[in-house]
Amino acid sequence: MKKNTLESLIWTRITRFVTESNHLSNDFLKRFGLTTAQFDVLIQIQTYQPITQSELAEKVTVTQGGISRMLARLEKDGLIERKQEWKIKKISLTNKGEEILEVATPEQVVFQSSFFNEALTEEELKKLYELTTKLQKYAHEKNLEQQ
Amino acid sequence: MKKNTLESLIWTRITRFVTESNHLSNDFLKRFGLTTAQFDVLIQIQTYQPITQSELAEKVTVTQGGISRMLARLEKDGLIERKQEWKIKKISLTNKGEEILEVATPEQVVFQSSFFNEALTEEELKKLYELTTKLQKYAHEKNLEQQ
DNA sequence: TTTTATCAGTTGACTAGTAAAGTGATAATA
DNA sequence: TATTATCACTTTACTAGTCAACTGATAAAA
């Protein structure tokens, strides 16, 4: 019984890479009082605000319930606000949220980029972008089919 | 303020791919009463048994506390056993664990591989393996430095 | 107008993980 | 021998997520 195909070796590499670089980013973002997941969500809100919870959930590939909890925490910390409007809730950043991102984003982008550009050449980066785009599109479509 | 470098685009693709393909695998493994995380741990135990908790934690990039909880669940389900031996605990699969893996592994390997080989060519797979190996090695080293 | 459906979000019970403090056995030192 | 350190693991309190059942408001059908 073969359990180590090239594909499953890649799978292991990718998941280990994601958890390890997540640890590093969490550590780095501690100075701003943020986690990697929170930073990810805040960036999406900043880009698309005002946005509904369902739209946001779709963008960060999390369930309705997951985004509900996450936003409850971010609201408690005063980083975002939810305004009930008709039967939907429109999410946007507060001034505090906006200010933190202004400082955190450039630093986090440089830090996060370092995992890639210190390990790979410019050519390899382009190839990797191409390959991961294909993978993600395929997995995304397969997920949509499932429902 | 530039927040969309090629690197951070790759980051997003990779993390979204990992969560989406994890959903698919979780769904697939439901028929064996397993989650993707549990399957991952069981395969490592099968490969290295008898193994200590600390060694196992290292292999699956999880903390001591994390592996302790995970193994408590797997033990409760009767898939593994922990034998106290001197001051360490040696982990191994039970018959039940071994039997489930025997059926689940070939199917899960085929399913997991499909995310890759249906989206990419053989050539691209080899390239991707090369690139992800570099990435993971780099992130792993950086994590070791941190401690 | 009452009922029913639907839609956006929340909540309960769970898995899976973290950091940091705690436990209990073994080994090293005073 | 008594004390202290260390080691392997557990536990507490938390973030982050899942699914599925539940609200509560709006819209559509009877």
Image (spheres, coloured by chain):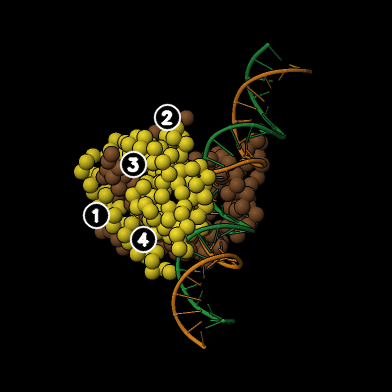
Chain colours: A yellow, B brown, C green, D orange
Report whether residue A33 is seen: yes
Where the N terminus of chain A falls, by quadrant? bottom left
- Which amino acid lies under the numbered mark 1 shown in the image of this protein? Glu
Q: Around disc 3, counting alpha carbons within 10 Å, would you say few (fewer than 14), some (14 to 19), or many (20 or more)?
A: many
**Residue A86 against residue A114 in the figure, above or below:** below
Residue at which label 3 appears: B135
Residue A126's x, y, as percent? Answer: 23, 47
Q: CA distance from mark 3 to mark 2?
A: 16 Å
Sequence-wise, the earlier of marks 3 and 2 is: 3
Secondary structure beneath dot 3 equals helix
| Residue in the foreground of this view, choosing between B78 and B70 | B70
- Name the secondary structure under disc 1: helix
- Residue at mark 4 shares a chain with residue at mark 2: no
Query: Which mark identifies residue B145?
Result: 2
Residue type at tag 3:
Leu
Q: Nearer the viewer, mark 1 or mark 4?
A: 4
Q: Amino acid at mark 2?
A: Glu
